[in-house]
Image: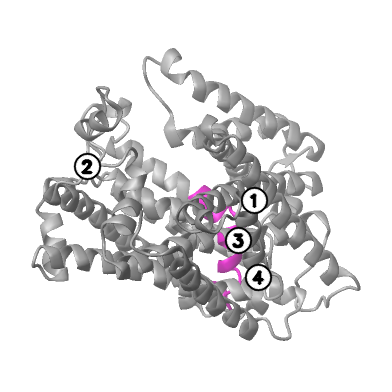
Amino acid sequence: MTGLSPTTILLVLLGYFLLLMAVSYVTSRRATNRTFFSADKRSPWYLVAFGMIGASLSGVTFISIPGVVGATPEVMKALTGKAVERANIYFSYMQVVLGYLVGYVVIALVLLPLYYRLHLTSIYEYLRDRFGVQAQKAGAAYFLLSRLIGASFRIFLVAMVLQTFMMDAFGVPFWATILFMIALIWAYTYKGGIKTIIYTDTLQTLFMLIAVVATIAYIGHTMDLSFWQTLGKVRDSSYSKMFFFENGWKSPNFFFKQFLSGVLIAIVMTGLDQDMMQKNLTCRSLKEAQYNMFSFSVVLFFVNLLFLSLGALLYMYASGVGLPLPQSTDELYPTLALRHFPSFISIVFLIGFVAAAFSSADSALTSLTTSFSMDFLGMRADEDAPDRPGDRRKRMLVHVAFSLVIMGIVIVANAYREEAVINKLFKFAGYTYGPLLGMFSFGILTRRRVQDRWVLPVTLGAALLAVVLDLNSATWFQGFTFGFFILAVNGLLTFLGLWLISKPGSIKN
C-alpha cells in the first residue's frame, strides 16, 4: 500500500517523538503549576504566533482543505455515482479565511485587552467575575465538552492512518495504538504544560509546512517547473476561482455567507476558546499578545492559500498521470503521498500529518487540564500565589484523567465508526460554542446583572432550540440552511435568554 515499510514508519515516528521529548525535558525543568498553566508569562510572541498555525490547522484540515478544492459537481458525481447540485468549491474557502482576519482583529482589540486587564489564565474566570460561579462553570463545561470531542476526533483520525499503514503489520490492536499515542502526548506535556506546548507547536508547524512545500515542489518537478512557476500554474488554472456571488444566500459558497461565517468562527473558536487563548495569555504583555494575533492572522492567510494550491496541484497531478480519484476527497492527499509519491515525500507527509494532528491534540489536553483545575478546582496561577500543598498532584491526576477519557471516546468511536457516530459527535460539539458567544457578548455589551443560578438552564435551552432550528431549517425556510450561522443564532438565543433573567444594575467589572 505504500513504499515505506511499517518498520521504517515506526522508526521515523519514534525519532520524531524523541525530539519532542527532548524539547519537553529542556522546557519543563523547575516547572511549577504556574509554568504549566501560563508558561510564567514569558513566551516570545513570535513563537506563539508561529506555533498557533499548527494548532489551528488540525490533521483533519491537513488532508481536507487540499481535497475540497476539486469537489465540483462532476467530481462528486464520479465519487458517489449521483448527480450533485452544488456550486464548485475551488478556492472558495478563502472567503472564510478573509472573515477570519476580521474576527482576529476583534480578538486583538476587544477580547485580549479584557483578558489582560483582568489578569486571566482561564478565560472563563471572566464569566465568574461578570455573572457568578455557576456561569463560570457552565462556560468551562461547554469548552470541556467541545475540546474532549474535538481532540478525540483528531486522535482518532491519526490512529486510523497509523493502524492501517503500520500497526496492523505488527499485529497491534487498535486500543493499543490509542494507548501508545495518548501515552506519548501525556509524556511530553504532563510536566511543562503550556510552556512545552509553545515550543513543540513551533516544531510541529514547521514540519507541517515542510510537508506541504515539499509536495508542491515535487509535483512541480514532475512538470519541469520551479516552485514559483508551479504556484503560477495554479493561479492560472480554473481551480483558483475564489469569490462566489451567484445564487445568493441559499448557496453554500455565497461570499457574504462564508465571510460572515469566518468572522464568527474566528471569534468563537479562537477568542472564546481556552485552548487557543491560553497560548496568547502566556505572552509578556498585552502589546506582545496583540503582535502575536496580528502576525498569526497574516501568516495563517498565506498558509491556507498554500494548502489550497496544493489541492489544485494534486488534482492536476492525478489527472495528468491518469490516476483514479479515491472514494473520498479527504483521501486524495494521503493516497497520493503514501502510494504514488517517492519515499521522501511519504516520510515528510507522515511527519507533517502527525504533527498537524498532535499540535491540536496536545494543546487540547493541556487546556482541558488547565480549565478543569482552575474553573472547577479553584487552582491559581498568579505570580503572588505559590503552589498550594497537593495542587501539583491534583493537576497531574486531572491530566491523566482527561487522557483516559479521550482514549475511551476514541475506542468507542472506533467501535461504531461504520455508523459515522464520531462525525455526528463532532458536529454536536459545534453547538456548544453558541452559548459561549452569547454569554461573553452579553457580558461585554450590556451592564445588566443576571441571576447566576439560571445561566446553565438558559444556555442549555438556547443550544437545544438551535439544534431544532438547524435540523429543520431547509424545510421551514424554503431550502435555506444555517451552516456556521447556527453559531450566531445560538448566541442570539443565549443573549435573549440572559436578558430575560437579568435586571438593570451595576456590574462587578
Q: Earlier in the sequence, mark 1 or mark 2?
A: 1
Q: Is residue 103 magenta?
A: no
Pick the residue in front: 361 or 487: 361
- Dots 1, 4 in contact, CB < 8 A: no
For mark 2, give the secondary structure. loop
Q: Which residue is mark 3?
A: 181
Q: How many marks?
A: 4
Q: Quadrant of residue 450?
A: top right
Nearer the observer: mark 4 or 3; the answer is: 3
Which secondary structure lies at badge 1? Answer: helix
Alpha carbon separation for disc pair 1 and 2? 33 Å
The earlier-in-sequence mark between 2 and 3 is 3
The residue identified by callout 2 is 324
> Can the viewer see residue 496?
no
Q: Residues within 10 Å of mark 3 (few under 14, many from 20)?
A: some
Position of 316 relative to 50 (above/below)? above
Measured as percent of width and height from the top left, residue 487 is found at 51, 37
Q: Which mark identifies residue 250?
A: none
Q: Which residue is mark 4?
A: 189
Q: Is residue 277 left or right of residue 80?
A: right
The quarter holding residue 170 reads bottom right
- Span highlighted in magenta in the image: 267-288
The kind of residue on which mark 4 rests is Thr
Report the amino acid beneath label 3.
Met
Between 283 and 230, the residue placed more toward the observer is 230
Query: How much space separates mark 3 and mark 1, taking CA atoms?
Result: 10 Å
